[in-house]
Amino acid sequence: MSTTSLTDRLGSLLMAPVHLLMRIIDIPLRAVQKTTGIGGMAAVFLAPNMLIFGIFVLLPLVINFVYSMTGGTAFFLSERQFVGTDQYARLFQCANYLDPMSCQEDAFWTAVGNTFWFVILQVALMIGVSLITALILNRDLAARSFWRAVFFFPVLLSPVVVGLIWKWILQRQGLLNFGLYQFGIEPYTWLTDRNWTFIATIGVSIWAHMGLYTLILLAGLQAIPKDLYEAAEMDGTKPARVFRRITLPLLMPNLLVVVVLALIKAVQIFDEVFVLTGGGPGTSTLYLTQYIYETGFASALRNPGLAAAASILMGLVLVVLTLVQLGIGQRSEKKGKR
Amino acid sequence: MGEITLTKIKKSFGAVDVLKDIDLDIKDGEFIVFVGPSGCGKSTLLRTIAGLEKVTGGQIEIDGKRVNEVSAADRGLAMVFQSYALYPHMSVRQNLAFGLENSNMPKAEVADRINEAARMLEIEPYLERRPGQLSGGQRQRVAIGRAIVRRPTAFLLDEPLSNLDAELRVSTRAELAALHARLGSTMIYVTHDQVEAMTLAHRIVVMRAGKIEQVGTPLDLYNTPANRFVAGFIGAPHMNFLAGEVAELQTGTVTLVTSGDHRMLVPFSGHSLSVGDKLTIGIRPQHITIANDPGSLKVKVRLVEALGSETVIHADLNGEKLLAVVPGQKQLSPGDEAHFSVAGAPLHLFDRNGLRVKGS
């Protein structure tokens, strides 16, 4: 008997259970296809995912909207009374729209204000830092892969871990004060100074997320053909002009994506700040998501309806930002096709 | 002026020597073509002249001045890249103006130069378009235009036609030759296509493995290749090579015997051969005729390519491949026997080291 026929037989023996399994799977699929037709099979295969999406995304969204139309402290919808748009009206009830303290929900407006300034400063700094890092990592550095990993690593950390790490560094008896003390500088209570905590939340969130944006920008930089730079070199173009006239315009699609992604992420800031400062001192680092969390679940006078209304408003902002992102994506896709 | 002198140019990337002792004089106004297979160092040589790569050793002089330490921008050269390297986000006009604006040239002069180049290259209708909206040929013109507006001492062209389709390549080649005649500037042109080299060059530099194999006019290289490599590289289809042995030496001729005991009488005026020497005989496919005369080679036909105006015959001579290009149409089929005659054909003799035998 030849070896080929032996391996063939061994192969068919091993494959037998697989074939059996395939036949078993076929039975219900054939039955389904008989009723749906071949065109309906796509829907059948999509159904499990759509079901999960429906249960965990769409349904909560709808329930959240229903909550925002109800009042009281009870959690179960059956025990809550319908109040229409009262919760929204409450959020917007202000004597003077320029002064958050004159609003009925002053904490909401404080959180909105804090989040606004946080988003503006954090995104601006994030873009700057990520761009500079990407530009440096794009050069012929020694151990370039190592440095890329170093900058990307924080992205892999859980936000809670990020918050804890920086708490250990910034707290009164933390690493930073220890380091400063070695140089004869008096320790400082970084996490109880309003200004410093605000700056710390910006710094920490940049540290935690810049890796992703750096990576996107680095990919953009590497997609710029080298010979464009060589052509510019032959033309005697100064580095600043090369950056302004060649690098920046060609990096613009990636830069726009990064801006929008960073905006969306910054609006949702919560976990690491909650662990690091808990929103304090006072309300100096109280951001919108934390306000929603505390209003809905944590405070003594919890008001799930109000929290739901605030989260719907925040959702609207995110929808607008996402549409902008989609618009940019489609525009660059069209450009790519041309 | 655009005289370029290379003396003992060396270039290494780490432990790899890409250029080895390159010596070359390029005269003002000359159209010189670097040709060679991929990885032979021709593009690197061009880039070292451009200043985009620093040499490891040796000296580059432009118009008598050493430029090793001079930046690419200050060497007064302009380069046309293989990929054209046009800035995709700028219009053609902006692309042409970009380099000139670096030197703070007055706007009126920038506009004049752009218009002049655009007229010369017939790209005026596209000045406001972006490179993405142009065809390959138009982009190629813009890339040349960007070099022209700088009025350089010499043009460096790195495989500028390789991204064009075959038809466009032929017409653009002719335009390039016309442009050179019109501008009269020195042009250094890199290609791996020996047809481009033959048609464009005043002189061709054949390179292999970081060294110059031969420098000469296209016909010099075709008629008297210095070695087997040049002989095989220049001319299409490639030259045939047959193993042979010196059988007899007479005054003014040498009798060679090839496999299958074919005897060939070759004119020879040198003194470097003796009976029994092993040689390689080079025969260009175009120099073979089909005729059953004494001394003709009896071959077996393997493949016939009828091109209409000529017929390419792939044949087998006792296990050695032989290619013939004969004018007109021949009624031959694979498996047929044929007689290849080399009577009166210029035969090239190469010694064991592949070098041309002196006097052959």
Image: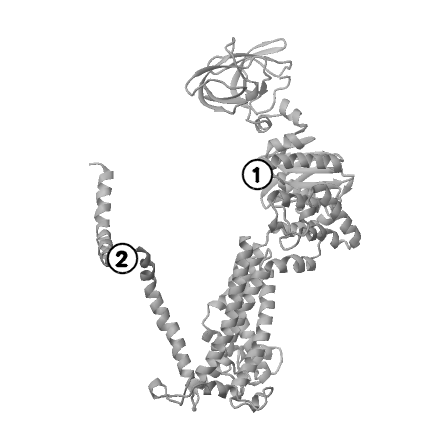
Q: Quadrant of the C terminus of chain B?
A: top right
Q: Secondary structure at mark 2?
A: helix
Q: Nearer the viewer, residue B152 or B282?
A: B152
Q: Is residue B163 visible?
A: yes
Q: Chain of mark 1?
A: B
- Residue B205 in which image quadrant: top right
Res A33 label: 2
Res B105 label: none
2 or 1: mark nearer the eye: 2
Q: Secondary structure at mark 1?
A: loop
| Residue at horizontal 60 percent and vertical 78 percent from the top | A180
> Badge 2: how crowded within 10 Å, few (<14), some, or many (20+)?
some
Image location (x, y in percent) of residue A229: 64, 52
Image location (x, y in percent) of residue B160: 63, 41
Q: Is residue B330 left or right of residue B70?
A: left
> Hey, what amino acid is under mark 1?
Asp
Q: Nearer the viewer, residue A21 or A163?
A: A21
Relative to A323, say whether B19 is above or below. above
| Residue at horizontal 57 percent and vertical 66 percent from the top | A130
- Residue B284 in which image quadrant: top right
Could you give the CA–CA distance between mark 2 and mark 1, rounded to whole angstroms?
A: 50 Å
Image location (x, y in percent) of residue A21: 23, 55
Relative to B210, say whether B267 is above or below. above
> Hey, what amino acid is under mark 2?
Gln
Res B165 label: 1
Q: Quadrant of the N terminus of chain B?
A: top right
Q: Chain of mark 2?
A: A
